[in-house]
Image (cartoon, rainbow, N blue to C red):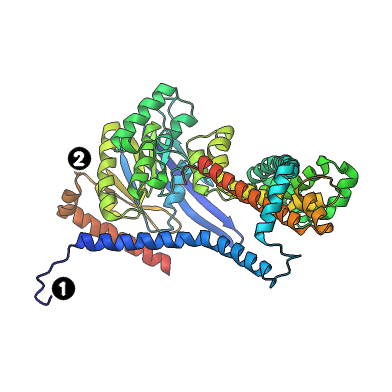
Amino acid sequence: MPPKIEINDLTKVFVKKTGSVTALQNISMTIEDGEFVCLVGPSGCGKTTLLRILAGLEKHSAGNFKINAEQSKRPLQSMVFQEKGILPWMTVQDNVAFGLAMRKAPKDIIAKQTAYYLEKTGLTQFASLYPSELSGGMKQRVSIARAFANDPEILLMDEPFAALDEQNKFILQEELLSIWAETKKTVLFITHSIDEALMLSDRILLMSAQPGQIIQEVRIDRPRPRKIEEIRKDPELAAQFVDIWQHLQKEVQKSRT
Amino acid sequence: MTQSGKIVQDPVRVERAEWKRQQTKARLQQLLTIVSPVFLLVLWEVLSRTGVMDIRFFPPPSAILQTFWELLVSGAIAEHVGVSLYRIALGFLAGVIPGIIIGLMMGLFTPIRHFVSPLVMALMPIPTLALLPIIIILFGIGDLSKVITIAGSVFFPVVINTAAGVLNIDKIYLDVANNYGASKSQFFFKIALPGALPVMLEGIQMGQAIALLTIVAAEMMGATSGIGYLIWTSYKAFLLQNMFVGLIMISFFGYLFSLLLRGLQKKLLPWR
């Protein structure tokens, strides 16, 4: 099977009045089908830019990328946005159904998929509420349910848990993993939290500070399903944490000078 | 409580008493909103009856009320109010509908915005009332000239608020629409319209207030009926009690329309 995502020498330059900034430089990577990959890097390293390019929200300057589709009817990708990504004027149910409704899926499929993912994310009883009545954690569940319900080839996640408190974050991470295990979707997940990356990933890609490049790859071969307690207790992962931390430190230092 | 701490207070009871005190206080404060207009009316009545205020300019509220009753019974109020409401309704719609359409187009299409907004900005400061003589020459002294005057005044706050409503939609919602493959018409109905609606309704609320301000002035010139006509002719004939009746009608309808629009707002924006 070909890799799910292929990225070759992708470069993005932003031109401004004061000159140009290279946000991404010659990014190359492949992500296998069903893989959960976290992209970790210091803030401002261009990781969100990379995700936005894959999401079709931004154009790249050079290079190319390909998302290999299995079924032509499926959308290529769906994104889970940062905290404010759900539509305040739609109920929870309509938000979850949004992608399906936009591509005019049959009514019965919309109803079935929506009900399924509402159930999976524990939102069934909140289906007719508006987002303003939900907590931050609930909102992100809506965002996750919307992306999975759309049944895309790959999922892109842009720091979806960054704004949550720590306990909610752990709970949502486990929930995300359990839905993901069931669907076997390919996920590219952006985070600045090393803990989060260790908890979720099959593979972690480390990015350098501007211009963003991929500088290291770390495999996490822990059995699944994973529990936050086990991840925290594991001495091998603790060593990996320190290793990744030192790498990032170096990058942060570099970007300061 | 004694020093030995033998008497233990029930915390629930303490808090309940405190809660009750807060409730009473809130109710008393609400009462103030009724007290203030009543106080003003009583003060007015006393001052004009005792001659501190000139009774010719400020007839006591009881006298105004009596005049109101006479005008109501004679059918004069129904006639003037009916005519004015008809003009307000038509003028309001004739200003709001193009305001919404042009405002949405300005918000959605950048070239249209660049083309139209200097015209809007330049024309907005001109009071429609200053154009009233021309409007009367062009459209006569009938209803049409009043309707157009109101429409011209209502149009600007609506067009500006609608365009601003579209432009102020959070960028992330545009990303969501793009990422989930919304078509142009889906984008309009699912993102742009509901996203712009809150600010748009503020503009319509403003337009409503301006429509009432305008009708009175528009009916002072070249009119033979309407609340503005009633106010103006009573003033010229020095029938100030009749004039005050007209003013009170305007105040009443302004309040009523505000309440109606607030209700509409609640209906249209259930997510807020």
Residue A88, x across and y down, in percent: 46, 44
Residue A248 lies in quadrant: bottom left
Residue A241 lies in quadrant: bottom left
Indicate the quadrant containing the N terminus of chain B: top left, top right, bottom left or bottom right: bottom left
Of badges 2 and 1, the one in the foreground is 1
Q: Which mark is residue A60?
A: none
Residue A69, x across and y down, in percent: 41, 29
Q: Is residue B162 visible?
A: yes
Residue at 77% x, 54% y is B231
**Of helix, strand and loop, which one carries label 2?**
loop
Apparent side of residue B226 relative to residue A36 in the rendered image (left or right) = right
Residue A225, x across and y down, in percent: 20, 40
* Chain of the residue that carries numbered disc 1 in the rendered image: B
* Chain of the residue that carries numbered disc 2 in the rendered image: A
> How busy is the neighbourhood of tag 1: few (under 14 within 10 Å), some, or many (20 plus)?
few
Q: Is residue A196 above or below residue A55?
A: below
Residue denoted by label 1:
B1
Q: Is residue B42 above or below residue B130?
A: below
* Mark 2–mark 1 distance (CA, rounded to whole Å): 57 Å
Residue at 41% x, 47% y is A132
Residue at 84% x, 45% y is B224
Residue denoted by label 2:
A225
For the residue marked with disc 1, what is the amino acid? Met
> How busy is the neighbourhood of tag 2: few (under 14 within 10 Å), some, or many (20 plus)?
few
Q: Residue furthest bottom?
A: B3
Verify CB contact (< 8 Å) between mark 2 and mark 1.
no
